[in-house]
Image: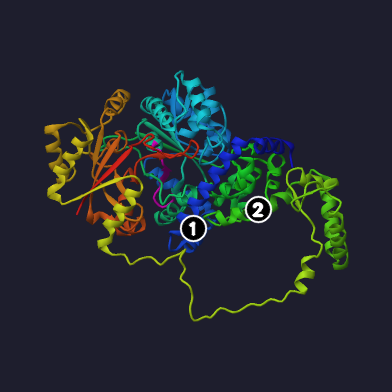
Amino acid sequence: MNSPFLIEARKAIENLQLQELLDKNADTREQRRVSSLRQLPDEAKLRRRAKTIRRETISNLADHLEKFTARLSENGIRVHRASDAEQARRIVVEIAKQHGAKLVAKSKSMLTEEIGLNEALASAGIRAVETDLGEYIVQLRGEPPAHILTPALHLTKEQVAETLSDKLGEEIPPDVAEINRTARGRLREVFFNAQIGLTGVNFGVAETGTLCLVTNEGNGRMVTCLPPVHIAIMGIERLVPTMEDLAVMLRLLPRSATGQKITNYVSLINSPRRDTEPDGAEERHVILVDNGRGALLGTSLEESLDCIRCGACLNACPVFREAGGHSYGSVYSGPIGSVLSPALFGMSEYGHLAKASTLCGACLDACPVGIDIPSMLLRVRAATPSIDPSVERGLKTYAWLARAPGRFRLAQRLAALATRFLPTRAGWITSLPGPMAEWTNFRDFPAFAARPLRTRLHNMRLDVQPRSPEIEPPDETHPLPETDRDDSKVDDFVLELEELGGEVIRCSENEVVDRVVGKLYVLGASRVLAWGPVEPILFTLLQRLEEEFHVTLPELPVGAGRAELLAEYDQAEVGITGSLAAFAETGTVVLSTASRRSLLPSMLPAVHLVIVREKDIYPNMEAWLEAGGAHYVANSSSVTFISGPSRTADIEMSLTIGVHGPSQVIAVVIE
């Protein structure tokens, strides 16, 4: 194995503070992942379906890409193809220069890390600012992300506070909530003044030309809505054929990544802002990046393209849990990174990473789309020459012994005898001779048994009592789903939203106005952003609100003046919207853009108050799509799923509410 990995891994293992942070991240993520997936009544079936979707997509990638590209163009989104990293960087810089951009607001994207985009923009005199909290912190420190989900995983709150104090020129205490408040205030200026918003893409839907982004903090919504130009950079493999396929992925991705049933924000973007809409990006670009992906099609490593970037394999991997992300020396770390990095960037430079694995199979068990990472690691190993001839000789010796039972038994006896003369601790060998010392340089080795297992089994009497087939214990880990009852949907929605930290007010239509006004007084609100009166209840509510509060129906101008207006809108304490639908399974409300339906009331104020009708609550996303929701998605420039207040756990896994989006979500359910 290459010395750079060993050197960095050894440093990580000796860093007790880092080890504590790595353990906390892995343990928390793994427990939440397992618990969340077990709540699915059809987990195994869903994962098989997801694997089938990914395999079918990659197997017919050219056809799906052609359809996706055509739909994007029909929707008014400008499409660019980049064969490699250099071409992708050049396209972004050219778009930025065409618009005279000096400031770019970025949402987290591993692909932009892969192509070195920030450095290219800086060389062109364009400032790119990461707006995800963890990415913002590591950017200030000049470091790469340490984890696909938690970029600042390796830092304590004291280190983060020290970084912010040094870089921002003000004293920041080592308090996670205060750190978040500071970052929120500083990044507000970036959102309001950026000429371009730049994001990755979690999934592209081929049949509709829809871009799907999933986030928790709320910065992704701002980056795609507030700047006049939005650029989305997407690997060519990040496709699903249909909206129904996307629904499957959205049930598995957040559960596998963070243990959530759904991320706080899911943005479905179809087009630039339309003439009748009050805000949104006026121009959208999609850059489809190959950068080695096409060359993997039809090869023994093609399956690596199935990855949906959930990070579950990193959290499950015993090697990553000790070595950390920076040891890999690649933007993609952990088990999947040990395949992707050699496949995309070269076997000679990254092939050694495939040896940073125990081949225990934990990554395969954790992968929501069933990628056979262990088998691909072996293929990469086979394609990478051994750098230690002594190890190769040792394996050949073992193979020679194992081919003859007599030789193997003799070797076992001699090894058991030798164990008596080797240093041991608690029954484990602490130092092996010769080339085998490489093992005990890093870990102990189990002592050889005096009586081999074969001998012990020969004399063992197995007493196996067959279980009676008459009574089978219930499968408590996969309970059968309850019958979908109409009268339970509201209760389920309320329960899920409240578990996410949201609040619910249940009332009749006649009570809505008084309940909303009363809540505003309790909140101490004076300024309100609101949707236009697109339905009777909102018309009646706005008439009453305008008598007692400063109410604004926000609208962003085309051209200059956006920053000043956004800063003014940001003074509102409460935003009020209606909703298109709601999902009982996840406590989610659905908003869509249209005439006088601004995104800003659900985005800028600290409190988002949303009105939901009982008849618009569906069991889940799939039920809504079947009932006509797919039509709304295809015919809206943007649809947003909101599940509770914005949140992050980027610093020491400490949950903090209200990062870039609202800190309170209040649903007024009309029964």
Residue under label 2, please give it.
376
10 Å neighbourhood of mark 1: few (<14), some, or many (≥20)? many
Q: Give the CA distance from mark 1 to mark 2.
A: 19 Å
Q: Position of residue 657 (x, y in %)?
A: 38, 38
Q: Position of residue 313 (x, y in %)?
A: 57, 49
Whether tag 1 and tag 2 are in contact, CB under 8 A, the answer is: no
Residue at horizontal 12%, vertical 37%? 544
- Along the viewing direction, whichever of 161 and 426 lies nearer the viewer: 426
N-term-proximal mark, 1 vs 2? 1
Which image quarter is the N terminus in?
top right
Residue at horizontal 42%, vertical 22%? 100
Residue at horizontal 48%, vertical 61%? 49
Q: Amino acid at mark 1?
A: Ala
Which range is magenta? 205-218
* Coloration mode: rainbow
Query: Does 451 appear in magenta?
Result: no
Q: Position of residue 475 (x, y in %)?
A: 47, 68
Q: Amino acid at mark 2?
A: Met
- SS at badge 1: helix
- Along the viewing direction, whichever of 142 and 557 lies nearer the viewer: 142
10 Å neighbourhood of mark 2: few (<14), some, or many (≥20)? many
Q: Position of residue 630 (x, y in %)?
A: 33, 54
Label ID, residue 50: 1
Label ID, residue 388: none
**Can residue 431 be seen here?**
yes
Q: Quadrant of residue 482?
A: bottom left
- SS at badge 2: helix
Does 144 sit left or right of 174 as displayed?
A: right
Compared to residue 268, the image places residue 151 above or below, namely: above
